[in-house]
Amino acid sequence: MVSLATRRIVPKGKLMDFITSMAIIPLLVGCMGIFGLFKLLQWIRMKAYIQDSVVVITGATSGLGKECAKVFYAAGAKLILCGRSQEKLEELVRELSATHYRKTHKPHVVVFDLADSDTIVPAANEILKYTGHVDILINNAGISYRGTIMDTALEVDKKVMETNYFGPVALTKAILPSMIEKKRGHIVVISSIQGKISIPFRSAYAASKHATQAFFDCLRAEIEQHEIEVTVICPGYIQTNLSLNAITADGSKYGVKRRGDKRDQKVKSLLLLLLEKKENSKVKEDAAQWRKLPNT
């Protein structure tokens, strides 16, 4: 049997709960306002950092490279779009120019193949001749691979290493002296979670990304004194044509497209990385590590 005193306490308790919940509402609204202000300031900071900066993007005609081109163009960067196809690069320039943003610059295209070492230095010279310097170099271009180690021809291993490792290394070395001279620059490398974790049937790809990770880790330490920043981004799987264009053990195309996270999410994370700077100007490396790999 419930006493009268108990009956009176229950409504009072509900009233206190109601008042407490109502008091939280202004706090939540305030927090949302602060979060919105933070995002606005973040966007302004991004615009200020990228506006009029010379940004070089390799592998710009598709996938993550193309999405980066769209975002950096909208932010007012002076884009240098690099790829193997003159036609696809010019098509991208037309696509970007058709968008309506204030204070943008017409992109410049440079055609070369990272797998062909003889084309890289001339391409770098063309870039520097056109712009005079490079503020941000995004080493994005790459090739994937599917196959067993036993069945994979050595030439396939070499091809993957040329595109994913030696190509970016050669381009970075060609651009780096101009950054050091200005004591300003940011080198961004799109690696992979497989640059950290090796899985079966990806030996050539994982090896190339491990090598890339190690090289640019060393580079970061060596050029810190010159105030040049190095960021290595290791995303998981993305909705691009990377797997579709992957090569197999005999060098033929894999031809299967897999599911992954949306490209725009990765691009936003990349831009945030460019803005997240420590007080001593070191860039936070590996901040784009993803929590888990999706099912294959």
Image (cartoon, rainbow, N blue to C red):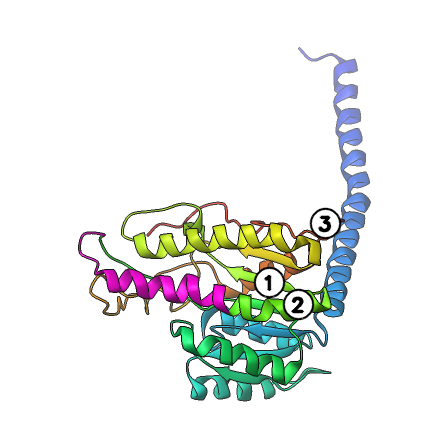
Camera-side residue of 39 and 84: 84
Residue drawn at (80%, 44%), measured in percent from left and top? 27
Amino acid at pointer 1: Ile
For disc 1, the neighbor class at 10 Å (few under 14, some 14 to 19, many from 20) is many
Residue drawn at (33%, 69%), measured in percent from left and top? 245
- Per the image, the residue denoted by label 3 is 278
SS at circle 1: strand
Start-end of magenta stretch: 149-170
- Per the image, the residue denoted by label 2 is 179
Amino acid at pointer 3: Lys
Camera-side residue of 35 and 265: 265
Is tag 1's residue or tag 3's residue first in the polypeptide sequence? Answer: 1
Kindly check if marks 1 and 3 are in contact, taking CB atoms under 8 A apart as contact: no
Which picture quadrant has residue 223? bottom right
Amino acid at pointer 2: Met
- Per the image, the residue denoted by label 1 is 187
For disc 3, the neighbor class at 10 Å (few under 14, some 14 to 19, many from 20) is few
Does the stretch in magenta take in 101?
Answer: no
Instruction: Give the CA separation, mark 1 to mark 2.
Output: 10 Å
